[in-house]
Amino acid sequence: MRFAWIIFVCCVFPGQAVADSADQLARLLAPYQQFSADFSQQVTDVRGQELNTVKGRLALDGARRFRWQTGAPFSQLIVADGEVLWIFDEDLVQVQVRPLDTALSASPAAILGGSAESLETEFSIERIGAGSRVRFDLQPRANDAVTAGVSLVFSGETLVVLEFNDALGQTTVLTLDSVDFTTPDPAQFVFVPPPDADVMYALETAP
């Protein structure tokens, strides 16, 4: 009888269930508005075959400032300074500069730094599981040509895994470690291209 009652509530009040999931997710993500962490990233193709694995370090300060750095064999630095997104490929000595608003769509920064209202506006959210390990599946409400879905896994109130599925069937699994909730140094979100780098601007107007 109790199970039937739960089904009845979810069917009659689906909007409330979605809102509750958004509120629960936003509450769990609140400490992650400002943090830094080590990470391991694994990318697999549509058949589940591993394409690459890299380790790195990230830092986030709200939804518009973040730093993402990976080591060999794919050394790359991505910095969002609040205005634009800098992508530095160390091996190519090449820098791309992109509009920040476009690049933030369904990004880790947009999700981790988002409010309950913004999460509910951008995604359909479903909570799966109970107890000490809970998963939130996020489906973009807009037709996103890049992101097919995002999942966040919590152990207790600790975010341990972020999973991104793209439109081509590739899956990126990001596992967090050594999380530090100290406010990141603002200097981490400033990027100056190396003098010998080839800088390509993908903005409406180049500086």
Image: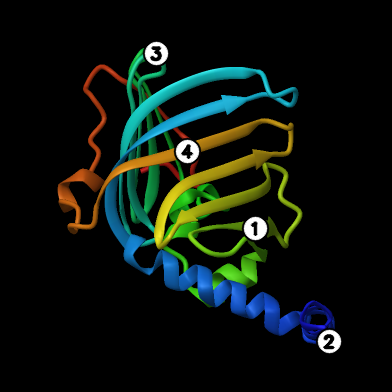
Tell me how far mark 4 sits from mark 1, CA to CA. 15 Å
Q: Nearer the viewer, residue 160 or 171?
A: 160
Quadrant of the frame with the C terminus: top left
Amino acid of disc 3: Pro
Q: Which mark is residue 174?
A: 4
Q: At numbered mark 3, what does the secondary structure look like: helix, strand or loop? A: loop
Residue drawn where x is 41% and y is 18% of the image: 74
Q: Residues within 10 Å of mark 4 (few under 14, many from 20)?
A: many
At 25% across and 17% down in the image, what residue appears? 196
Residue picked out by circle 2: 12
Residue 57 % position (x, y): 30, 36
Q: Earlier in the sequence, mark 4 or mark 1?
A: 1
Q: Say which of 66 and 38 sits in front.
A: 38
Q: Which residue is mark 1?
A: 138
**Residue 72, x across and y down, in percent:** 35, 15
Residue type at the position of mark 4: Leu
Quadrant in the rendering for residue 198: top left
